[in-house]
Amino acid sequence: MGRWTRGRTVGRGSSATVSMAFSSSSGEVFAVKSAEMSRSESLQREQKILSSISSPHIVSYKGWDVIVDGTELVYNLFMEYCPCGTLRDAIDRCGGWLGEAEITRYTRQILIGLEHLHCLGIVHCDVKPRNILITEEGAKISDFGCAKRVEDLAGPTVGTPMFMAPEVARGEGQGQPADVWALGCTVIEMATGKAPWPESGDPFSVMYRVAYSAASPDIPSCLSDEAKDFLTKCLRKDPSERWTVTQLLKHPFLARLNSPVSKQCEELKSSSPTCVLDHGFWSSSSEELDHDTVDPEQTVLVNSAADRIGQLSSSSGRPDWTWKEDWGHWTTVRGHFDELNRQLSGTLCGSDGGPIGLSNMEGLEITVISRDGCKKFSKGCKYREGGDVISSAHAGQHGGNSVTLIPKL
Ligand SMILES: Nc1ncnc2c1ncn2[C@@H]1O[C@H](COP(=O)(O)OP(=O)(O)OP(=O)(O)O)[C@@H](O)[C@H]1O
């Protein structure tokens, strides 16, 4: 990647921090996922997997490096920057659930990405809306920190309780059918705004229920018959009976790409707040995870033997679930962005390549580049809000060009 500059933090997970970044040599904007070298094992595993795959529906790999930060070595994984956030953010922006046409489109795109992975003998192991990124080209699978090759499936079980297939929750194995189950759960979250088992409480109860009860996730009644049938094929309890991604890509549900949103969902949507997409990508606030509670939608690492779920199951010999200590949380950038965007609309002027006036901004030095040509327009502009807030912005008065501001650190 050559010389590059770190920008605004756009997300934090349990293992790493993701920031925007900017290449000084090419002008390219990309994302960098960073972890201290001593805690970068999962990031390095992610690098190995991501560097071996290429699909329009998987986030693109751009390289890696190690840098010295003070006394620490930091491992960095570079990938394409996805400016529209995650699928969970998209659900929130649209008032809490998506219409069936959007669900169909995203589901097909996720399946295309999964088919590529599965053909290469890789299991993602943590498919969920928070790990699907949205770009202008649609949905892209991201976060390969839990991914495994089928020949290495013996390692610890990983995943997110509410999206775990029964065989995974029982500790019996985590093959490609587990990704299909998690895709079914993702469809449920797109349709209802909630992951399956919303009433089950803490993650241990969720996993116990998934593993040992006869219950299946509720199929949203607002979905069409084709969508419901698609879900039943994803959510078969026996992994050997679950459809494969290749079979699912041929399911009639996905042939209905231009179908109207089902009536009940349409009614629900029309009685909900206006879709905030109308107001621009970054105007809504995102959900912050509560650090003090264990969130069943958070990725967990499940080690060996039998304590916690064993307490719930009352019988011995059941698997023990050990959680990652460091839960991480989302960083909200949108409040800052809104302010930044307003200032930009008022102050940007000139045409492509011409001068840009940002004179009423003070504080952080920034570089302005266009998103289309990644061309530098101006250096040393000042941004009033302070901090390293920078994200993509739409500058209406700048010939309709989108511009990206990169902090000069
Ligand atoms: N390429 C990207 N472009 C834009 N934002 C991204 C990108 N990759 C990640 N993010 C943001 O950073 C957040 C954390 O990234 P990611 O899920 O990969 O981290 P993690 O540490 O592996 O998380 P987890 O706790 O699920 O293991 C994402 O949810 C998303 O909001």
Image: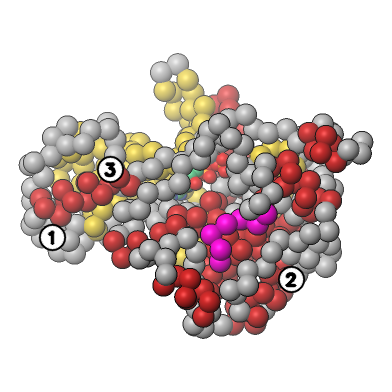
| Residue 191 in picture, x, y percent from top left | 56, 66
Within 10 angstroms of label 1, few (less than 14), some, or many (20 or more) residues?
some
Instruction: Give amino acid for label 2.
Output: Lys
Query: Closer to the camera, 136 or 56?
Result: 136
Q: Quadrant of the N terminus?
A: top left
61, above or below 225, in the image:
above
Q: Is mark 2 within 8 Å of ligand 1?
A: no
Local SS, label 1: loop
Within 10 angstroms of label 3, few (less than 14), some, or many (20 or more) residues?
some
Question: In terms of secondary structure, what is the magenta stretch mainly?
Answer: loop
181, above or below 380, in the image:
below
Q: Which residues are magenta?
A: 191-197
- Label 3 or label 2, whichever comes before in sequence order: 2
Instruction: Give amino acid for label 1.
Output: Gln
Residue with the mark numbered 1: 397
Q: Is mark 1 within 8 Å of ligand 1?
A: no
Q: Is mark 3 within 8 Å of ligand 1?
A: no
Distance between the Cα atoms at labels 3 and 2?
Answer: 43 Å
Q: Residue at x 7, y 42 (%)?
A: 359
Evaluate if marks 3 and 1 touch, with contact meaning CB atoms under 8 Å apart. Answer: no
Residue with the mark numbered 2: 233
Evaluate if marks 2 and 1 touch, with contact meaning CB atoms under 8 Å apart. Answer: no
Instruction: Give amino acid for label 3.
Output: His
Q: Quadrant of residue 281?
A: bottom left
Residue with the mark numbered 3: 336
Q: Quadrant of residue 58?
A: bottom right
Query: Closer to the camera, 407 or 393?
Result: 393
Within 10 angstroms of label 2, few (less than 14), some, or many (20 or more) residues?
many
